[in-house]
Every structure is written in structure tokens, then in C-alpha cells.
Image (tube, helix red, strand yellow):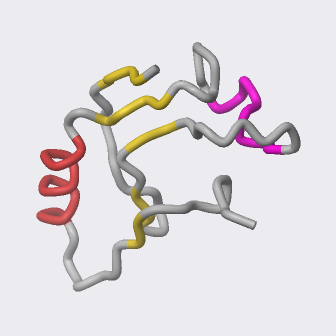
Amino acid sequence: MINYKEYKTILSKKNNMNIYRGCTHGCIYCDSRSEIYGMTYTFENIEVKTNAMELLEKALSKKRDKCMITTGMTKKCKSY
């Protein structure tokens, strides 16, 4: 199931970005499944950040220096 939600921010403090939350793999050992991360439904349901492009444009316009933006897999979602 895919859920759509608008967010307030897109970049982390270290300029990491992910346009979705959740994971369809369902690994039982995954610490990202914890309720402390604010998921209000089953973690296997993907949450798409519908306003990601607007948030990225806004965040980049505030940067004073050039920076590298990393996307995709974060510390919480790695393939093994």
C-alpha cells in the first residue's frame, strides 16, 4: 500500500534526502520499524513525500555554499 503525505523538510542536517519512508522488504531485524520513528501504520506500507521537489528547491535556495546531497539508502535502510 502506498500513502501520500506532505512534509515540512526534505534534507537532514548532513544533507541526506529520501523522498519516501517505509520499506517493502519487511526484515524482522530492522530497527527502522520502531514506532519511535513516527510511523502510524505498517512499516511495509510506503509513505511518499508528495512535496519533495518543492522542499528540495526551497532547501537548496537557502544553502550558502555548494554542497553534496545524498539520496537513496540511509543508515536505516541498507541492502545486505
Q: Residue furthest right?
A: 29
Q: Is residue 43 left or right of residue 21?
A: right
Q: Nearer the viewer, residue 63 or 70?
A: 70
Q: How many marks?
A: 0
Q: Quadrant of residue 33?
A: top right
Q: Residue at x 24, y 44 (%)?
A: 52
Q: Residue at x 63, y 27 (%)?
A: 43
Q: Position of residue 16 (x, y in %)?
A: 44, 64
Q: Residue at x 40, y 24 (%)?
A: 2
Q: Residue at x 53, y 25 (%)?
A: 45
- The majority secondary structure of the magenta stretch comes to helix
Q: Is residue 58 left or right of residue 71?
A: left
Q: Residue furthest top?
A: 40
- Vertical arrangement, residue 27 with respect to residue 43, above or below: below
Q: Nearer the viewer, residue 67 or 43?
A: 43
Q: Position of residue 35 (x, y in %)?
A: 72, 24
Residue 73 lies in magenta, yes or no?
Answer: no
- Vertical arrangement, residue 50 with respect to residue 66, above or below: above
Q: Quadrant of residue 38?
A: top right
Q: Is residue 19 left or right of residue 28?
A: left
Q: Which segment did they paint magenta?
A: 30-37
Residue 31 lies in magenta, yes or no?
Answer: yes
Q: Nearer the viewer, residue 53 or 80?
A: 80
